[in-house]
Amino acid sequence: MKVHGEVLEVHVAANWCMLTDGNASSPLQSKWHAFRKAEHMTTYLPIDELKAQAKRLRQAMETRGSAISHSAALELVAQQHGVRDWNTLSALATKPNADPIAALSVGSQVRGRYLNQPFTGKVLALAETGGGLHKITIHFDEPVDVVTFESFSAFRQRINAQVDTNGVSPRKTSNGRPHLALDI
C-alpha cells in the first residue's frame, strides 16, 4: 500500500493489523490498530454485508495502488472480525445468533441495584462469556455511592460486571445480595 509516496506493507494477524515500511527504526512500527476478537461477539453481520465490506476494502486498496483479489479481501475481512479465515466467518455468520439476554442490547436504558444502591443507566457493552453468563458494561446516569458508611463515600459511574440471563450477578456481597441486579 502506498501512503504519501511511501510503500507500506499491511500485516494482518487474527486480531491485529500493523502498518510498516519494513524499517525497524520507523515510527510506523509502533502504529497498531486493534480489532475486536470474535469470541466477544455474539452476533455477526449478514453474508451480503460482509461481502460488501470486502468489496469496499478491495476498492480502497486499489485506489491506493495495491490491488488485491476479492478472495484476499474476504480473508482480510474475516481476520478483522477475529476469525481464522473467510470460511469460518461465513459459517459463523449463517448460524443463528445467540439468544439475547432478555431485551438488552448496547445502548439500552437499564435500571436496577448495584451493591444494593438503585441506579439508572445505559448499556455500553454486552458480550456472551459462556456458561449462561454475559459481561456487561453500564454507565450510570448519576454516580452511585457504593459505601454505606455515613462518613465515607465512594462513587461509581461506570461498572463492568457479569450477569446471568435474568440480569443478576452471580457474585454476592457479604450479606448475600448480588453485586448487580437489573430490572428486566
Image: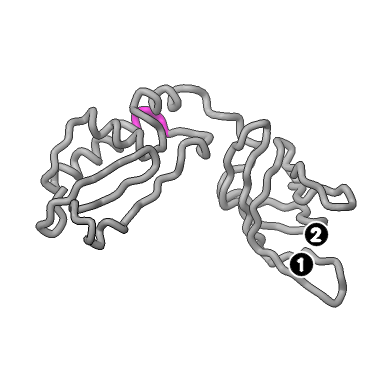
Residue at coordinates 87% horizontally, 74% vertically from top-left?
150
Q: Which quarter of the figure has residue 168?
A: top right
Name the foreground residue: 165 vs 162. 162
Q: Residue 10 at what x, y percent from top left?
A: 23, 45
Mark 2: which amino acid?
Gln
Task: Check contact, mark 2 vs mark 1: CB within 8 A.
Answer: yes
Q: Horizontally, is 105 left or right of 144 in the view?
A: left
Residue at coordinates 78% horizontally, 72% vertically from top-left?
153
To which residue does mark 2 refer?
Answer: 117
Over which residues does the magenta segment extend? 45-49
Q: Horizontally, is 33 left or right of 131 in the view?
A: left
Q: Is residue 46 magenta?
A: yes
Query: Which circle's residue, 2 or 1, is located before the other in the chain?
Result: 2
Residue at coordinates 70% horizontally, 42% vertically from top-left?
163
Q: Horizontally, is 144 left or right of 125 in the view?
A: right
Q: Horizontally, is 22 left or right of 160 in the view?
A: left
Q: Is residue 43 above or below residue 178?
A: above
Q: Main secondary structure of the magenta part?
A: helix
Mark 1: which amino acid?
Asp
The local secondary structure at tag 1 comes to strand
Residue at coordinates 29% horizontally, 36% vertically from top-left?
76
Name the foreground residue: 143 vs 87. 87
Q: Residue 99 at what x, y percent from top left?
A: 61, 30
The local secondary structure at tag 2 comes to strand
To which residue does mark 1 refer?
Answer: 145
In the displayed image of the protein, which residue is found farthest to the front? 24
Name the image quarter holding the C terminus: top right
